Image: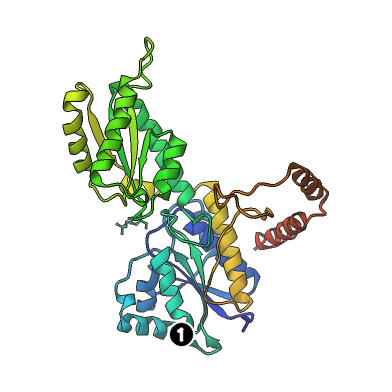
Amino acid sequence: MALSKGDKVAVLTSGGDAPGMNAALRAVARVGAELELDMVGVEDGYAGLIAGRVVPLSIRKLDEASRRGGTFLGTARSKEFATPDGQKKARDTIAREGIRGLVVIGGNGSLAGAHTLCDAETKGGPLLVAGIPASIDNDLACTSMSIGVDTAMNTIVEACDRIFDTAAAHHRTFIVEVMGRECGYLAMTAGIAAGADAVLVREVGKTDDEIVEHVVSTMRRAYSAPSEVGDTTKKRVLVIKAEGVHIDSARLKELVDTRIKQELPGTDTRVTVLGHVVRGGTPTAFDRLLGARLGNAALRALADGRTDVMAGWVGPGVPGPPTPYDPYVVLTPLEQVLAETAKLMSGESPLAMWRKKIFQEVERILQR
Ligand code: F6P
C-alpha cells in the first residue's frame, strides 16, 4: 500500500561507511519533505534501531554533510541485530515509533538485514523497506556502481601517483594493498587507472607461488628493460594487491625478496597498506550524484508502496544488449547515435523528456 502524507519514514546507514552516503541521506530527506512524509534518522545503523535512537532529520545539516565523507548518522556492524533478541528489539522500535517505511543505506550485510525486516508489523501493514547500495568494495549485484566506489578509486589512484614518484626515485618495487574485502573490483579498476604494472586479485585464483612468480616476472621485465640516459621511469614497479588475496603483503614481500636476491641485486621492495585511508575523504561529484539519484528513487519507490527492493544504478538508458566484452558496454550503430542525439537536443526523445521532468522536480525539491 502506498504511503500517505505524514507517514513516518526512517533512514539509517549501516556497515562500512562509504563516501556519498551523506548525499544519499540528503536526497532521502529532501525528497521525503517534498512528498510531505515525516522523515527521521536512526543513529548508528541497526545498533541504533535496537536501542531506539531515532532522531529528527535536518535538511540544512544534511546539505552541509553531503559534501563530506563518512556518515552523518553514524554506522555500526551490529552483531546483536543478527540475534532473535536483537531483531525483536528493532521491531519494537519500529512499532513504538510508528515507522511505516525504512530506507537502509549500506552493503551486502546491511541489505540482508533490511530484507529480514520486511515483515515487521506496523499500524498500516507490513513495514515498507528499500535498500540503497553503498560500499567501496563494489561487491553488490544489480547495480553497476555502489556509492563510495568512485571516491575510493580516486583516492587509490592519487596515492599511487605519489608512490610512483618515490618508487621511481629509488628504483623500487612497491606492493600497495587496497581494501575491497573479497572483491577485486577496486584493486583492478584503480590499478588500470593508476597505470600499475601488475594487479593481484583473489578472483583469478592464483596460488601463492604463482603470485610470487607474477611479481618477480613483472620486476624482471621492468628492471631489465634498456633505459635511455636520465630515464628512470621504467626502473620501478607498482603492484596493486587486493585485500582479498589471502597471502599477507609482508609475507609476499619476503618471498619476493628471497627470489630476487640473486637475480636482481640492488633492487628492493616496499609494502604500503592503504587501509582505511581509502574509505574516508571528500566524496567525488559522481558519488554525490549517485547518492542523490538512488536516494530519490528509493524514497519514491517506498512512497508508491514498493517494498523489499534495492535501487541500483545501471548507467544511462542506452538501448541494446551488452557486449560480450563488458556487461556495461553496449555497441550502438552510429546512425542511431546521431538520430537519438538529434532528438535529445530537440527535446523529443524519452531521455530528453525525462531530463526535463527531473530538472523541474529538482528545482522544487531545492526550494525547501
Ligand atoms: O566493506 C567495506 C570495507 O572497508 C572492506 O573493504 C574492508 O574489508 C572492511 O570494510 C573493513 O571493515 P572495518 O572497518 O570494520 O575494519
Q: How many numbered marks are there?
A: 1
Query: Which image quadrant is residue 197 in?
Result: top left
- 207 vs 353, nearest the viewer: 207
| Side of 327 where 248 appears, left or right | left
Q: Is residue 31 left or right of residue 41?
A: right
**How far from the left and from the top, in percent, is residue 206?**
30, 47
Residue 127 in the image: state x and y as whole percent.
Answer: 51, 82
Residue 221 picture location, percent across and down: 33, 25
Residue on which the image places disc 1: 120
Which residue is depicted at the point 45% across and 76% down?
A: 115
Which quarter shows the C terminus? bottom right
Q: In which quadrant of the rendered view does residue 264 lie?
A: top left
State ligand 1's quadrant: bottom left
In this view, the residue farthest toward the top is 229
Place of residue 256 in the rendered image (x, y in percent of width and height, measured from the top left): 21, 35
Using a 10 Å C-alpha cutoff, classify the residue at mark 1 as few (fewer than 14 neighbours), some (14 to 19) or many (20 or more).
some
Mark 1 CB near ligand 1 (8 Å cut): no
Residue at 42%, 48% in the rendered image:
186
Nearer-the-camera pick, 180 or 212:
212
The correct choice, above or below, for 7 with respect to 135 in the image is below
SS at circle 1: loop
Q: Is residue 89 left or right of residue 253?
A: right
On screen, residue 299 above or below 219 = below
Q: Is residue 282 visible?
A: no
